[in-house]
Image: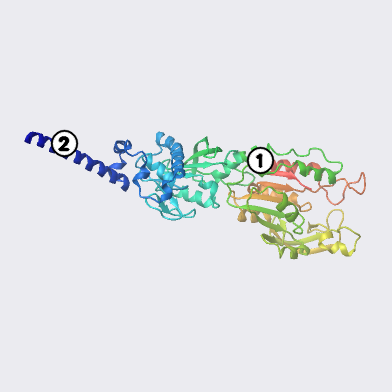
Amino acid sequence: MRRVSFTRAVLLLGVVALGLWLLSVEFAVVGGGGSAADPAVRAAVAGRRTHAQAAVRSPDAWRTREWRREVDRHAAVLRRHLADGMLAASSVAVCLGGAQEAMALRELGVVGAVAVTRKRSPPLAVAGNDRRLPFPDSSVDFVFAGRALDRTKRQADLASEAARIMKPDGHGHLVVLTSGAGDAYSLRSLQALLPSLRLFRSRVINGADGSTLRELVFRKHADVSNGNNSAGNCTNRDHKLEIIGLAEPLIQQEPAKPWLALKRNIKNIRYLPALADIGFKRRYVYIDVGARSYGSSIGSWFRKQYPRQNHTFEVFAVEADPAFHADYARRKGVTLLPYAAWVRNETLSFEINDGPGKKGDHNARKPNGRGMGRIRPAAGSMDGVSSGEVRRIPAFDLAEWLKRTVSELDYVVMKMDVEGTEFDLIPRMIDTGAICLVDELFLECHYNRWQRCCPGERSPKYSNTYGECLDLSISLRNSGVLVHQWW
């Protein structure tokens, strides 16, 4: 009897010891450290606890079926990166899309994974925002952005912060899931937001809703440089040339009736947002050079017809004629530049041609019937017709202003109607590299066109030919600018 009792006591002590050991392992899992970082230990408890969620004291929302499904979806995406060696149990991993992502990583063995959310929610989430992620520079091995860049309104800020906290020299990785970046233009726009990172690989995966997503993996390298736009040379323009190849062809032959042909051509125009995703941009800017009144093109065309992909554009109106300035005082969201666009900063002569009606007619002095204004050479009157009304006005260097105002990170649309001055402005913008900052240009090129009033006669107002206008448009497209022939 004593021997049996002794044997039972030994067995009981063994069971108690095993229970204490398993309990210690559970505490280690909850604490996120110690032996739980060892995959072998995690494997020992995997059979009894399928989900690490059960070991975490968490809000009730973390225990719902939908939350569980999200964790499993993220785990399916992230599992490959562990298999490829980008992740290890000891990796410092940060998730930008939600606590489900951090839970998925923890269940896969990355026990220190955390998510960044607006409010702190331990143990899975720390407080932070798109402008400031709460981690030191170069301290994180793996950043899983998920769909965060698609959903934030501060893409440039979030991208910059993600790159800042990543470890350099190829040790840090960023994984982005996006519904965009499916074309060269969109992908290049995203890469421009991450100048210190290099695209390592990409693949197409299925989203939770059945949509198609692109998974992009970036590495951080200290020697990455995207180059600068130097004189006459737009770097990284291949993505724009691909888009230009899809655009409407330029009109090669001079139209016999330009007042009809060029106006009809607007139906053939293929806008850039109809050809590519413009979502990965810091700002959206429309510049109307030679704007005249608000209703001339900003209100009547750009804000009503241009496909903006639900983005809000900053609008700049460049107009030297004082007759139109009062119209902009009551327009919201429009910045008026009351100067003439030119190749340098100076004061020059600005000539206003007669509008509809007879010379001296009162209607010709009203904004609705006012003639077109253009820069007058310092040597004297313009070639051909002169109206006699000349003003001294300030002019500014459009190319230098553009380089100070926007960057490659911005999406820039420009309309230019400057009564012949385009033959001065465009070469200047090409020479300075400012043209590289313009994504889409609507150019009304002025030449000695056939006159509507007088068959067989050309307009004496301009000396340039249609061939010169065509050459100007061709040079712009070769520079990577999607230019359209406007009217």
Q: Position of residue 391 (x, y in %)?
A: 79, 64
Any part of residue 458 in sight: yes
Answer with the quarter of the image where residue 273 lies.
top right
Q: Is residue 273 above or below residue 370?
A: above
Total numbered circles: 2
Give the CA distance from mark 2 to mark 1.
75 Å
Label 2 crowding class (10 Å Cα cut-off): few <14, some 14-19, many 20+?
Answer: few
Secondary structure type for disc 1: helix
Closer to the camera in the image, 80 or 74: 74
Colour scheme of the rendered structure: rainbow
Q: Position of residue 357 (x, y in %)?
A: 90, 59
Viewer-side label of 2, 1: 2
Q: Position of residue 1 (x, y in %)?
A: 7, 34
Secondary structure type for disc 2: helix
Point out the tag, 2 or 1, that comes first from the N-terminus: 2
The structure residue drawn at horizontal position 43% and vertical position 40%, both measured from the top left corner, is: 170
Mark linked to residue 284: none
Q: Is residue 446 above or below residue 209?
A: below
Any part of residue 166 in sight: no
Q: Amino acid at mark 2?
A: Leu
Label 1 crowding class (10 Å Cα cut-off): few <14, some 14-19, many 20+?
Answer: some
Residue hosting label 1: 275
The structure residue drawn at horizontal position 51% and vertical position 38%, both measured from the top left corner, is: 215
Answer with the quarter of the image where residue 78 lies.
top left
Q: Is residue 110 left or right of residue 313?
A: left
Closer to the camera in the image, 381 or 309: 309
Residue hosting label 2: 11
**Which residue extends farthest left?**
2
Q: Position of residue 229 (x, y in %)?
A: 60, 46
Q: Is residue 180 left or right of residue 175?
A: right
Q: Amino acid at mark 1?
A: Leu
